[in-house]
Amino acid sequence: MKYALLVLFLLVNICAVGQKSNVFPGADEQSPSRAQYFSWINNCNEGPTEAQTLINLDFFKWMQDEYGMRLDIYAFDAGTIDGKRFYGSTDSDRFKNQFPSHFDPVYKKAKQMGTRLGVWGGPDGFGDTPKEEKARIEQMVSLARDYEFELFKFDAVCGALRPEKQDAFVQMMTEVRKHSPDLILLDHRLDLGKGKPHSTTFLWGGDETYIDVHMANKTTGTHHRVAALSRGHTPDLKRLTEDHGVCISSCLDYWDDDLILQAFSRSLILAPEIYANPWFLRDDEFPKLARIYNLHRKYRNILMDAKKLPDSYGPFALARGNEKQRFVTLRNLSWESKKVTINLNEEIGLDESRIVEVRQFHPTEKFIANAEYGKSIEIEVLPFRSALIYVGKSLDEPTILGVNYQVIKDNDKETVVELNGMPGTNTNIQIQNPKFQTAIIDGKKQSKLSTGKQLKITFAEKKIKLPYHRKLNEFTEISVPKDVDALYEATVFSADNNALEVRSIQRSGWSSIPQVKKAQQAFFEQDVFINKGIWDKNLFDGDLKTGLNINHKWNVEQRIKGGCFRLDLGEIVDLDELRIIVTNEFDLQPQLLAEGNWVETSTDLINWTKDAYIADTNANIKINKPFRYLRIGYAPQRIVEVEGYKNGKQLNSKNWRASNLFAHADKMKAVKTWKTTFTPTEMAKGSYLCVALEGKHGVEGAYAAAKVNGTYIGAPDRAVSYQSNTWEYVNRRSDSNYTYYIPLEKSMIGKEIEVFVMSYDTEHLDFKPELYITTSRIPFEKKQLLLTKK
């Protein structure tokens, strides 16, 4: 492909002598997509380093070796050479500190993987003298000539292109494309003037996709990515635009639904495209990431042409492919499952054929049917999910009849498939067109399968009688309960104000895979991340150089009504003295040294007692009683350590947690309350409650919590996300349609669960709470099928 583009580039330029407007900008609407990762949010404006980049590339090399996933482009984002509001140089001390061997080690490692590099920057940087202009041109040309760069992302954040430098820009890009004729130039909010023909894409809608930071839900939903799944079509279904890819850094659940739409619905010139921190996924999610990339690469040559489907297919339904093969993307943006009828004819872009294969690739893989052309197939699309359906001639794909499954890996030696079934069910499975030497399920050989015969398998565990996703009882307005403050405290104590990335690693856990764990550690061990003080664990690490800060990024006050410092010991602890350590008087603001204050402690969130202390850089607070919960009526700017002592001995603080942005209960006066109850008789794996607040309730104007047999249960998660001490930019705030998420446990079966919604905004009381139960994933039981090839 690269050489074909080179020939085309040369022909265009030969024919365009004297016609500067005739430029081939690296790709056209019929160019196959290129799979990309870019590093924004892995680092911020300080830029990446050679060491961290090599660790990240090791992750992608592992993905390639383990699952066959190939990355076409690895793009450096802000701060590599240029930065926000400045133009840099590869000759600068700053660049040399970050990349002491220039791009040579990174280029060498990427090339071994078949991956090329890209970089973020600005369109100018030509200086004010001919010498400076020449140096800038040579620098950018050298990236293509010496390092085979395939992408430049030029962004107005760095600076505009001065009109008098448009000719220099044209000269630069003309020289660059002599070495990399297929180089893609992303135009983010720029006026390039004469240089416009060199631009490959434009930024679609100006949107960035960092979940709950730059993109957040506008409706209620089962997860945080409803807004991402709600994105429609690009203008005229153009592929030479940039949708900013799929951010994998915050609010990770249902990232794959998001990526399916990015890769197979929009299928832009950069697809599949992810950025930030894919190493934050769970270890069991990496096969799905690779599968999406691999499927797209395998079929990308037919994914250029698209056809909008009728409204009956649901919002923004699309079919891509040719007259023999169509990939249909569907989505459901509602609380109830939808049945979609796909007509196997010209309606989806197929020409007449005798037999049509229908299979599903997402959310699970499933062979549906070999159907006659012109017939119809009904597909269920789950609430707030996407679906990928293939219709057309028979595919050379692993196919297990009679069961939902997920391909884990498929190479020349073996195929590994995860078989999925609902608990307590059984089914007959069969391999279509068997070409395998052995078939092994969970370690046991199954000769029937390898010879093409049916095999009955059973998925253990008790059968689930009720739908795992369903609406529950209606809410009723009640008088504000006496323990309304305890309900509020249950939720804010269950939640946190850590960076969204911290919440992601806590969701997924630290990896057991060395290449993944190193990438995780490289992120969290960055000096910039540590110094920002955005993880409460810094208070319990014994290090006076780390702490928990109030993040005033972009001069936005993050504290809600002044904030409140909260400490949860995880259990009731008998403690004599608590030491809250800061390093200077300014850290105590809004309090000052030598002022008297008090902390409040409680064992049950209902009864609180006060203990006085004098503010100092080492506040020694005499408590002398058992407690679990502690709060201070304000939030200090920075605390570096919290220590507890009993009989002069420091206590283990491994399970202690803290927060600092939520309002104190005294500043949250409930004015309206709703309640509903239900008693679960069974519990699907991964079940949680969704408390959906339909309508306008005000910013931080309504909260939800529960009681189970009198025990307070908070909502540790919410869309849009609770306020955080942020890594890159401040959280998105919303005044309507919050959804609170309350996890359920099997120990709650048979117990009455009371769910409460409390409203605190007197001007926005006309909203309706609704309650649903759902699961974090389809609650399948799983078996592993290993097929060794002949």
Image (spheres, grey):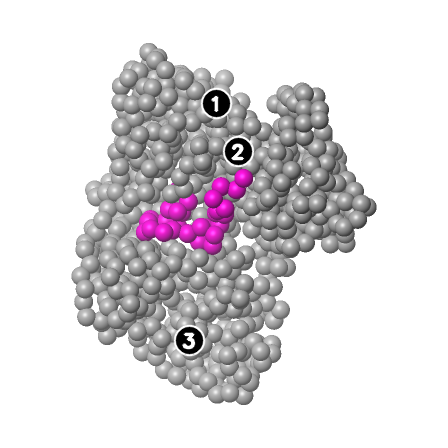
Residue 240 numbered mark, or none: 2
Q: Nearer the viewer, residue 643 or 22?
A: 22
- Tell me which residue sits at (60%, 46%) in the image: 155
Q: Which residues are magenta?
A: 202-229
Residue tagged 1: 302
The quadrant of the rendering that contains the N terminus is: top right
- Tell me which residue sits at (42%, 45%) in the image: 228
Residue tagged 3: 631
Q: Mark 3 Cα within 10 Å, few/some/many (few <14, many 20+)?
A: many
Task: Look at the magenta stretch and give its main secondary structure.
Answer: loop
The amino acid at mark 3 is: Arg
Residue 704 vs 324, above or below: the answer is below
The amino acid at mark 2 is: Leu
In terms of sequence position, does the residue under pointer 2 or pointer 3 come before the other?
2
Foreground mark, 2 or 3, reads 2
Tell me: 628 left or right of 175: left
Tell me: 666 left or right of 130: left
How far across and down, in percent of the image, does residue 469 sit?
26, 45
Foreground mark, 3 or 1, reads 1
Foreground mark, 2 or 1, reads 2
